[in-house]
Image (spheres, rainbow, N blue to C red):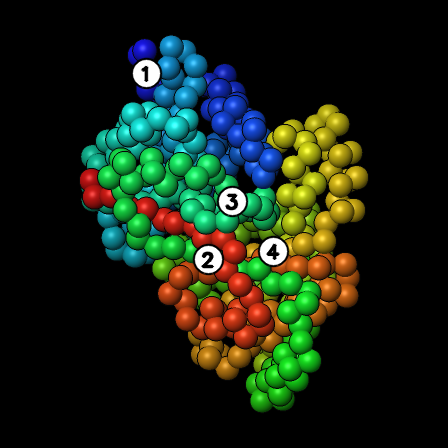
Amino acid sequence: MSLDLEIIRHPRQLRDFFSLANRIYKSDPNWVAPLIADQKKLLDPKRHPFYENAQISRMLVRRNGLPVGRICAIDNRAHVNYWQEPVGFFGFFECENDPEVARMLLDAAAAWLKPRGLNFMRGPMNPSTNEPIGMLIEGYDMPPMIMMTYNPPYYNDLMEGAGLTKIKDLLAYELRKENISERLLRAGEVLRQRVKVKIRPINVKDLAAEIERVKAIYNSAWSKNWGFVPMTEAEFDHAAQDLKRILDPHLVYFAEDGDRPVGFSLALPDLNVALKHIKGRLFPFGIFKVLYHSRKIHSARVWAMGVLDEYRGRGIDTLLYLETFLNGTKHGYDWAETSWILEDNVMMKRAMEMMGGKVYKRYRIYEKPL
């Protein structure tokens, strides 16, 4: 049976690009289909600000006309320039359990990247560290949290069979309501007295100014993190517009030294609990299902937490986590995921362990020389 690679250039080809995932996961009770409208925007160089500094090639493999695999090759010049390393990326990978198809996809992505002066291919990035990344390798017994990836267990075998190797693992911690002990509360109070910073909730009546405060911290706080690329103004504003739609003010906190914001924590309600029921289609009737099932959301994901470099090592990160968790439980959240955390981020891992957090999912980034 013949395999054919096609480059996606027309909207009608994107229909097959998206429908492939529905077929691969049709029997998997834990898969949550991403919103197709959001995916279309994320993959459209004319509509998403990421592509002001990047290019993408969207590819599909067919067997006798039927889609059996997909991938995107990504040339992110913002990363190349920021880190001064000639690395290209792949993402949006979906594939049947067929090593030949997987190798064809990954080889095609590598062939597109190599002539651009890139010496390594890394991924999955969808399409950058500011979006969902990584391949799930542990923790298949629960659905993914909002803006986290999910895939069948055999994907790891496909990656290794195509010659890719691990470069970094990302951890997701599970924090349960019952982890809050009297000892932890006392330790938090001691830490508050010692650190002498104010932890306060977001002021939704001053949301525009609060977003500017987050913007001032975000790129600085993550500047040295592995794989991080600073957001442009356009990317940040784009992300803020999306996040405002699902923001819960009980889950967003700032740390301030006097009047100066020095850190923030942003957790999101796990909207996947509701999205699971609409198979990626919000309209015409999916919106009503989302509204109905949103009442059943009792979990949240800490999506971003950052502290300015000169304030690190004081326990401010722990205070932000603790304040988020304590207030979240008061407003109907029974448990939370903190993700993703780099496997070698000792300080963050220590904060999680202090709060009784357990690693319950692990994601992997792969790399291959070109």
Q: Which residue is mark 2?
A: 171
Q: Which residue is mark 4?
A: 301
Residue 96 image point, x, y percent: 41, 26
Picture residue at 43% right of the left edge, 39% below the top: 153
Q: CA distance from mark 3 to mark 1?
A: 31 Å
For marks 3 and 1 on the same chain, the one whose residue lies earlier in the sequence: 1
The answer to whether residue 283 is left or right of residue 237 is right
The answer to whether mark 2 and mark 4 are in CB contact below 8 A is no
Residue 283 visible here:
yes
| Three-letter code, disc 1 | Asp
Q: CA distance from mark 4 to mark 3?
A: 17 Å
Disc 2 is placed on an element classified as strand
In the foreground, 259 or 13:
13
Instruction: Single out the mark in the foreground, 2 or 1.
Output: 2
Question: Which quadrant of the figure has residue 261?
Answer: bottom right
In the foreground, 241 or 109:
109
| Three-letter code, disc 4 | Arg
Number of dots carrying numbers: 4
Q: Which residue is mark 1?
A: 4
For marks 4 and 3 on the same chain, the one whose residue lies earlier in the sequence: 3
The answer to whether mark 2 and mark 1 are in CB contact below 8 A is no
Q: Residue furthest front?
A: 141
The answer to whether residue 346 is left or right of residue 356 is left
Q: CA distance from mark 2 to mark 1?
A: 36 Å
